[in-house]
């Protein structure tokens, strides 16, 4: 998969991520939003893609240290996105085999990446351990933003557990792919554990405004998020977003 660092800064895709970034920064005026979980209803909606590109986009901000964690202990893929090894990772730290410094990968001056390491047989049990909680607390002191990729919340409970360790959640919705009812149930799961949904990213949305039909991600800010699931007075680009409602 190509990440956005390979694209021109003026590319619409880079611009789309920048606008998501701005929305997140805007909802973080009090600096309390540090750990951001990225999840979606089902597989293949683009969680890992969005988490990776958001982390890259944030790393372009001056003087902000970003960490991207692969929290998908079922189907890790961040190491593949960045073509790095995965023999050590978060699991090595939780098991006490390695420290953070010797485990992280440096992507650029501002972005560090932590892969899963060797996947355990009991992912959901690990996510609720005190060690995991302490680990997140520790890294919070070192980074300005921590993005956590995760498994689909509509399929397994891991993302619900990870949301308890996070300050906010980005909900990826794959345009035309996910059933609306299924997405609503997934959103309810997050609401039930009182996760703070920061917004939804509409991914794989085919733009009709260009000649090439490229895909991009679009962000719905916190105030707009309700409308994604219960459109009533959604004015801006109503038709396009309705497509998601009906999907
Ligand atoms: N905006 C996009 N446009 C085109 N292809 C995309 C887009 N976003 C993701 N993809 C592709 O869709 C596939 C799934 O993406 P990704 O691995 O990010 O999804 P995921 O939700 O993390 O999947 P999983 O549930 O398996 O972890 C990949 O092949 C990726 O390259
Ligand atoms: Mg993934």
Image (spheres, rainbow, N blue to C red):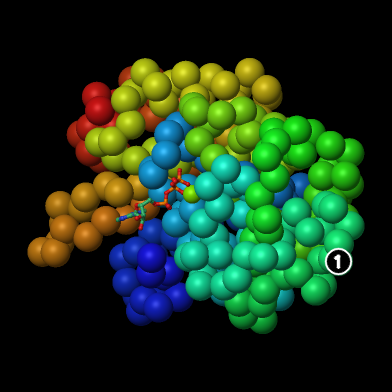
State the residue position of label 1: 99
**Percent of width and height locating residue 78:** 54, 60
Count of numbered tags? 1
Q: Is residue 145 visible?
A: no
Q: Is mark 1 within 8 Å of ligand 2?
A: no
**Percent of width and height locating residue 144:** 74, 61
| Point 61% across, 76% down: residue | 107
**Percent of width and height locating residue 174:** 34, 40
Q: Is residue 119 visible?
A: yes
| Point 32% across, 71% down: residue | 11
- Residue found at the far front of this picture: 121
Q: As drawn, is 244 to the left or to the right of 103?
A: left
| Point 39% across, 43% down: residue | 45
Which quadrant: the C terminus?
A: top left
| Point 60% across, 40% down: residue | 169
**Percent of width and height locating residue 214:** 22, 60
Compared to residue 75, the image places residue 5 above or below, namely: below
Q: Nearer the viewer, residue 24 or 132?
A: 132
Badge 1 crowding class, 10 Å Cα cut-off, few under 14, some 14 to 19, many 20 or more, is some
Compared to residue 183, the image places residue 73 above or below, namely: below
Q: As drawn, is 75 to the left or to the right of 9?
A: right
Kind of element beneath mark 1: loop
Q: As drawn, is 177 to the left or to the right of 149?
A: left
Which quadrant: the N terminus?
A: bottom left
Q: Quadrant of residue 165?
A: top right
Q: Quadrant of residue 100?
A: bottom right
Q: Nearer the viewer, residue 131 or 55?
A: 131
Compared to residue 11, the image places residue 20 above or below, namely: above
Q: Nearer the viewer, residue 235 or 222?
A: 222
């Amino acid at each position: 998969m190509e990440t956005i660092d390979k694209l021109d800064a003026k590319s619409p895709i880079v611009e789309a991520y920048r606008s998501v970034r701005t929305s997140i920064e805007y909802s973080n005026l009090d600096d309390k939003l540090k750990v951001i979980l990225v999840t979606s209803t089902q597989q293949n909606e683009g969680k890992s893609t969005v988490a990776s590109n958001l982390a890259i986009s944030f790393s372009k901000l001056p003087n902000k240290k970003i960490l991207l964690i692969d929290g998908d202990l079922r189907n890790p893929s961040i190491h593949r996105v960045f073509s790095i090894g995965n023999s050590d990772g978060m699991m090595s730290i939780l098991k006490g085999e390695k420290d953070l410094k010797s485990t992280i990968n440096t992507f650029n001056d501002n972005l560090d990446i932590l892969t899963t390491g060797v996947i355990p047989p009991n992912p959901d049990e690990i996510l609720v351990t005190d060690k995991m909680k302490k680990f997140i607390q520790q890294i919070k002191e070192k980074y300005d933003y921590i993005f956590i990729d995760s498994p689909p919340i509509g399929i397994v409970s891991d993302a619900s557990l990870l949301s308890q360790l996070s300050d906010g959640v980005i909900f990826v919705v794959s345009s035309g792919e996910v059933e609306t009812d299924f997405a609503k149930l997934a959103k309810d799961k997050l609401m039930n554990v009182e996760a703070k949904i920061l917004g939804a990213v509409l991914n794989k949305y085919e733009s009709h405004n260009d000649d090439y039909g490229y895909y991009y991600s679009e962000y719905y800010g916190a105030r707009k998020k309700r409308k994604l699931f219960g459109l009533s007075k959604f004015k801006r680009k109503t038709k396009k977003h309705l497509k998601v409602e009906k999907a």
